[in-house]
Amino acid sequence: MVPLCQSHCLKSMTDKIRNFCIIAHIDHGKSTLADRFLEITKTVQQREMRDQLLDQMDLERERGITIKLQPVTMQWRDYNLNLIDTPGHVDFSYEVSRSLQAVEGAILLVDATQGIQAQTLANYELAKEQGLVMIPVINKLDLPAADPERVSLELAELMHIKPERVLRVSAKQGHGVAEVLDAVIAQVPPPTRGIAQTRALIFDSRYDDFRGVVASIRLTDGQLKKSDHYELLGSGARGELLEVGVYTPKLQPRELLKAGEIGYVVTGLKDIRLVRVGDTLATAHSAQALPGYLEVKPMVFAGLYPAAGQAAEKLREALTRLKLNDASLVYEGEHSAALGFGFRCGFLGLLHLDITRERLLREYNLNVIVTTPSVAYEVELTNGQILTVRGALELPPAERIKQIKEPMVKVDIVAPSRYLGNLMTVAQEFRGVYITTDYLGTHDNNGRAILRYKLPLSAILVDFYDQIKGVSAGYASLNYEFLQYQVCDIKKLDILVADEPVEALSTLVYTDEAYRRARAIVSKLKNLLPRQMFEVKIQAALGAKILASERIPAMRKDVTAKLYGGDVTRKRKLLEKQKAGKKRMRLQGKVSIPPQAYMALISRQD
């Protein structure tokens, strides 16, 4: 039991703490608003200020997007404010969900020119599920196209509040920013006072070559100081804290971290696998673990292979370190006939894949080959067993398969009402099933609508996003979430070269699209494969049925060139002999497929 005086001290300390995050759609000004917070609270000196200060990676600043959540501690009107800046893109929603569990409130930020977008809705729902206090804020009032009245009505309708409660700011110019911080102090509740046992939730981590794993924590109970002995309740790892502190946003060592605060601890552990996001750090072995996070399920799979001259072991080490900083990345080793040893990796989406590839190149100097993305299918066998299949090579023989299920996603498309017809046409072309249409604000052509569809995840991997952007003049925004697995009509398309099946080139296709895909693959292979001394037949087959076929003509040597007259039968004999030889080679010859041909078919860059 906590003594009365100690209980009162703990309460008074936590009353002055506010933990909050900023959630919004991509490019609505989260990082710019965070910059202004740092300026007016004087957390960062003016000479050290630069745009997107909390975006620590060069990649984030170049692309103008937030990829990693970033905590920072600020002082404002005698209050200790702990902010977590979160990403806005759908592929990094796992970063957002982790941030929401470390705070009590959220600023819901909306662009005054664009209004509510798809990811605004998704993040709003996530925050509502966590029971967070939400402060609606409209940004970019300084822009000529700003329409704060319309956007205020949209937010009021979404959150069931009065439009007057919506705050208005210009993060770029700093107008109204102080009022937002005052609203955080007034509306966001302080952290609840915890139990006497010290416990902290790990919500992020990174690796330091000299000091081991540095973990970002939300201290829920007790207090932590340097030299405290700790245990990670999930992995069982133990050690002594080398340092504790807060983010300003640099690492700022402190004597003590108190309950309710957000900061970091230097664990000293060199094995990065021992420190997992969602684990509980405690000073007592008998402490009860915190709930942690739901395990993330990757939706998109692709192969990563080291480019020529680079070792797979170096790639393994780089992926291990990336996973420490990116808990949503999963990987396992695999071997390809074309590319050698590499890794099958799971991602939350195509941007997540692209960012991972770019980080491997920049942070670890690794140039990798990325294979065509695919999704995970559930295959039910005739004996009742259920397998997870991520490619044609893993698919069992057709006679053993009872049914195949594919992942379905619920897609929210937010766009002006005048583009609804075009968007519905695109969604149906991509095998979409209509769910509903909701309207934001007015129902006329000047208003905006949320179009909801159910689509196969595999359908939106290719160019669905580009298509909806194209037909909506760039106004549409997209968010999707996993819905369920659904039975589908998918089969394995086999590729035969010189009557021999080439397993590495086989692919999974919808039955009604099989002919088109078959024609495309054999036509491409015809141009990729080198000519042989015999005729080469290229075929695409669905089971026993040949859907498409092409032939590469044989290289022909002029065997009659040395003849300079005489009986014509001499020429005929040589030609007949050549013809018989080529027939024999066609029956017995093997075609060696060059790596360039494999790469051209399976590489995402093509």
Image: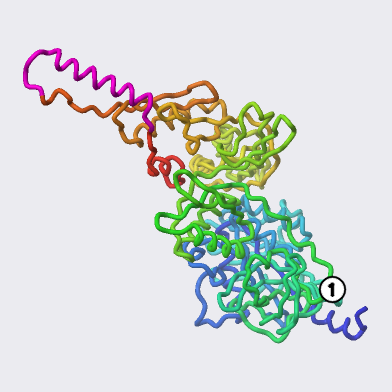
Judging depth in this view, the residue of 566 and 463 nearest the camera is 566
Task: Assess whether residue 566 is covered by the magenta stretch.
Answer: yes
Give coordinates of residue 532: x percent, y percent: 31, 32
Task: Assess whether residue 279 is covered by the magenta stretch.
Answer: no
Query: Is 206 on the left or on the right of 219, as rendered?
Result: left
Quadrant containing the N terminus is bottom right
Check disc 1 and give the amino acid type: Gly
The residue lying at 59 percent from left, 51 percent from top is 346
Give coordinates of residue 457: x percent, y percent: 61, 41
Judging depth in this view, the residue of 122 and 490 nearest the camera is 490
Query: Is 249 on the left or on the right of 220, as rendered?
Result: left
Judging depth in this view, the residue of 210 and 48 nearest the camera is 210
Give coordinates of residue 173: x percent, y percent: 54, 71
Q: Is mark 1 on a helix, strand or loop?
A: loop
Query: Is 157 on the left or on the right of 592, as rendered?
Result: right
- Residue 406 falls in which quadrant of the image? top right
Give coordinates of residue 11: x percent, y percent: 84, 79
Q: What stretch is highlighted in magenta?
A: 563-590
Judging depth in this view, the residue of 68 and 315 nearest the camera is 315
- For the stretch drawn in magenta, the main secondary structure is helix
Judge whether residue 582 can be spotted in this image. Answer: yes
Tell me if residue 220 comes above or below residue 498 in the rendering. below
Q: Name the residue under label 1.
A: 194
Q: Residues within 10 Å of mark 1 (few under 14, many from 20)?
A: some
Judge whether residue 417 can be spotted in this image. Answer: no
The residue lying at 45 percent from left, 61 percent from top is 366
The residue lying at 31 percent from left, 27 percent from top is 534
